[in-house]
Amino acid sequence: MNILFVSSEVTPFAKTGGLADVSGALPKALAKLGDNVKVVMPRYYRIDRNKLEKLPIALGVDMGSLGEVWCGVYKSTLPKSSVEIYFIEHEGYYGRSGLYDENGVAYEDNDIRFIFLSKASLKLSLALDFKPDIVHANDWHSAPMPILLKTVYENNDFFKNTKSVLTIHNLQHQGFFDKRAMDILGVGWEHFNQYALEALGGVNILKGGIAFCDALTTVSEKYAQEIQTDEYGFGLQEHIKIYSYKLFGILNGVDYEEWNPEHDKYITQNYSVDTLEDKIENKRDLQGIFDLVPSDEVALIGFVGRFAKQKGIELIASCIEGLLQLDVQMVMLGSGEKWAEGFFSDIAKRYPERFGCYVGYSEELAHKIEAGSDMFLMPSLFEPCGLNQIYSLRYGTLPIVRATGGLDDTIVNYDKKSDKSNGFKFYEASAHALYHTVKWAVEVYKDEKDEFVKMQKRAMKEHFSWIDSAKKYQKVYLWTMK
């Protein structure tokens, strides 16, 4: 199949979260299965145009009330593949320091910037004479494409057999704007209604995409259920229920070339399920990096992620002093809400022998934490898929998670009688539940060492590849055609 895959961020060119990881990996997996995939994204200021090929293409894009807007196109390939990626070049829209915001403040013209991305991507498809069987949009940033295909391009011969798939990576972000966006979209005011684009008197781009796409997917089976509830639906739960007949949950894969303790270039000592005893060298290294008291016996718990409410950072803060009274050490890597950055930095000063904190991001340190920790903490309030718990499984670092979204789908709670347990999980989003689950995990680590090691080896044999995920996406593509 010909697949036009459009995303606002793609690893390694631009990344703020998991969307970029999916967009950098899924097209390559689809290509390995035989599909012809072309990826499109903006050419942000941070992407060096000197490393790209400039194409002799100028696209005139009809932006409704703004008139015709022109852009250039650059080209490259996704690393370690022949998958072509195209960059929409418009200095006014994308020549900025941020992708979506600056200093935490969203750009006021984000509606224009990403409606332009969608329109330019379809124009590019025409210019390349690349007739897509599937247009695959991701989150609200490219959700205008399914809308445009069913309205502006409805009678266009080039796209007459094209179907659209929209993937929701995080429902919290919906693309909610003033109703002026209707005049820029140019799809007709008859679609400004509660079943399509209208929400609270404004335009909700993701809502429109959900209504118009041929298939809707999200990044885990559990999250597909959760987004139809009041707790996780962010106001769109009833709208999604209407279209649940075309909703599919497909768990993300992970890149085992990058996340594999057997040949991880960042860690002190490589190891495998057969040489699990060598993992201890990475624990010693991690204790040294954070100046913790050297000890093989103490349970070391890691955290890598955004310091944000979604990630359960407030739950950790509420019980951190109680946790540190247990026989544990903890290390945290991340950034985000300023209060959290200051709070955990202060905890590190007060408990230097047991707690370490690095504010910021380091790819090397993230790998070292995965390899050196005994357990990995992910107490998310909601987690569409989650990747770190899957990385942790591969490294024999048992996840401690809240049972939500992809965390619930991938982690099986500890039970001595089970031969499927691979971690620890709790259900209530409370500091009390988090504390007692960590306490329980530490007790198992201390008092049931043989069971803990069995679980580590079981975890390391788990497999969540992108090829498996890509095969499920192919089935969805075929479903839209039927």
Image: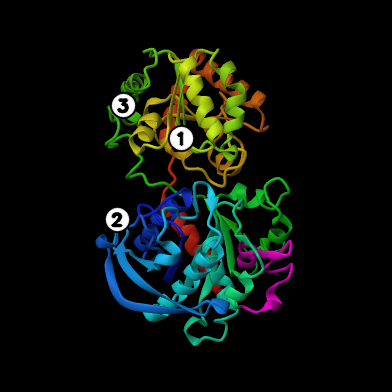
Please give the residue where the numbered disc 2 appears in the rendered image. 79
Report the mark closest to the observer, 1 or 3.
1
Element at badge 2?
A: loop
Please give the residue where the numbered disc 3 appears in the rendered image. 275
Extent of the magenta region: 187-210
Which residue does the image show at 51% across and 25% down from the upper left? 344
Which sits in the foreground, 107 or 391?
107
Q: Tell me residue 61's x, y (percent).
A: 47, 78
Residue type pointed to by label 3: Thr
Which badge, 2 or 1, is on the more N-terminal residue?
Answer: 2
Give the Cα distance between marks 1 and 3.
30 Å
Q: Is residue 27 above or below residue 21?
A: below
Colouring rule applied to residues: rainbow
Which badge, 1 or 3, is on the more N-terminal residue?
Answer: 3
Which sits in the foreground, 335 or 157?
335
Q: Quadrant of residue 471?
A: bottom left
Element at badge 3?
A: helix
**In the displayed structure image, the side of residue 400 where residue 89 appears, left or right:** left
Q: Do the CB atoms of the residues marked 3 and 2 lie less than 8 Å apart?
A: no
Which residue does the image show at 30% across and 31% down from the upper left? 267
Give the Cα distance between marks 2 and 1.
26 Å
Q: Is residue 47 visible?
A: yes
Q: Which mark is residue 427?
A: none
